[in-house]
Image: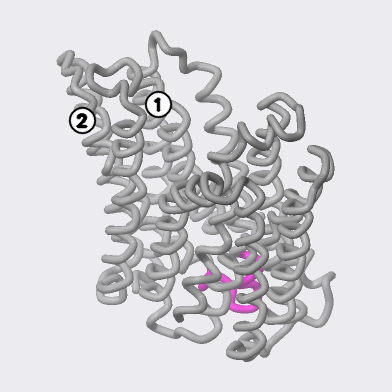
Amino acid sequence: MALLIGLSALGVLPFNMFVPSLPNIATEFETDFATANVAVAGYAVLTAFTHLIAGALSDRFGRRPVLLAALAIFVIGSAGCCLAGSIHIFLGFRMLQGSAVAGFALSLAMIRDTAGERMTAQVGYVSSAYALAPMLGPSLGGLLDGCFGWRANFAVFVILGASAMLLVLRYFPETHLRRSASMAQQYKGYGRLLRSAQFWAYALCMAFAIGTLYVFIGGAPMVAAQAHGASSTTMVGIYLGLVPAGFVVASYAVARHGSHLPSSGLIVAGRLLTCTGLLIAAVLAALQVHHPLAFFGPCICVGLGNGLTMPVTNARVLRLYAELSGTALGLASAITTAGAGVIAFAAGLLIEASNARVHVLAAMLTTSLLSLCAAALILRWESRAGDVA
């Protein structure tokens, strides 16, 4: 379990650990910041693709070989970034690092294979690591850059990836013993999933929930800039950290107690909690309360709500079709990532410095209500089936 948690953290850590180094990377390679920033945006696109294929490949060939292959590609990509002599070589190898996200997807698939009734609890622990790593990553990356230069970030990734490979070789048996006969069966599985209304309810619930988070991440700095007392970047960082901290707390609570509670009830409770927090923030905005915590305080409910929703919804996706668990999770994760990215892009077109607080809250409330609607459908279907375990 400790190794699964570590693999989950490694799956998300490369996304933003090196972000404090972007200006230095742009300077060294004599390029503009927008080009260097492709290392973030392009990576996000590649993670959606990795989610899509890693799960299907693991249903066909097994979890262990696909995980080892993904880690090997990640190590090669990290080494290439560390040694790159131009921005184009750097960006090319940076895209290979996107294979790391398979560590999260396949950790959940392995839990599906082995955990039985404890699956929701174990998914909660893995989800906690998935949320905690991005909180700590930029601080570690900034420290490494300050002490050793930006390439040290990627040297550390090489070490982490190689260590993970050795640990998987030493401690991980193959957990998926009922493999599909061919990749054609997996392609048919995609069609079966895409025709399932219940699968779409799970996927859209997660996409709108994470979309709410992405809108917050993109718009919150502008809201903070408007608020009195939030001019310090340190304070902005603390305020932004409230939401992922809420996710960690709630997902840990699911890990500890989720197996004793109805899963569909937890999904709906998470969405109601998020909507309630955002409604409180909207009321405070309407009352012209301008303290930063009038916005950021209620927004902690976004993290708490997602922490209740995401582990349980992922667990339900894994249970939907036993023979397609990896494929289902990969497709749902790809839809979640792509959908949330589209939501964040659309919200970004509407949000400006002059209207940041109102429009950010409006966008977040809209996506949260849509996620709640999907959760209500899940509750209705599972209640009819008598499946609320």
In percent of the image, x 37 and y 37: which residue is there?
369
Could you tell whether 80 is left or right of 122 in the image? right
Snapshot quadrant of residue 38: top right
Q: Quick one: label 2, few (<14), some, or many (20+) residues within 10 Å?
A: some
In percent of the image, x 16 and y 18: which residue is there?
289
In percent of the image, x 79 and y 72: which residue is there?
185
Q: For the residues labelled 1 and 2, say whether their Cβ atoms are less than 8 Å apart.
A: no
Q: Which mark is residue 221?
A: 1
What's drawn in magenta, residue-wise? 318-328
Residue 243, above or below 388: above
Could you tell whether 204 is left or right of 40 in the image? left
Q: Quick one: label 1, few (<14), some, or many (20+) residues within 10 Å?
A: many
Residue 190 makes an appearance in the image: yes
Q: What secondary structure characterizes most of the magenta part?
A: helix
Could you tell whether 335 is left or right of 218 in the image? right
Q: Please, what secondary structure does the residue beneath circle 2 have? A: helix
- Indicate yes or no whether the magenta region holds residue 165: no
Residue 326, above or below 300: below
Q: Position of residue 9 (x, y in %)?
A: 50, 63
In percent of the image, x 40 and y 57: which residue is there?
132
Amino acid bearing label 2 = Leu
Q: Which mark is residue 173?
A: none
Residue 5, above or below 42: below
Q: Which mark is residue 293?
A: 2
Q: Earlier in the sequence, mark 1 or mark 2?
A: 1
Q: Position of residue 18 (x, y in %)?
A: 58, 46
Amino acid bearing label 1 = Pro
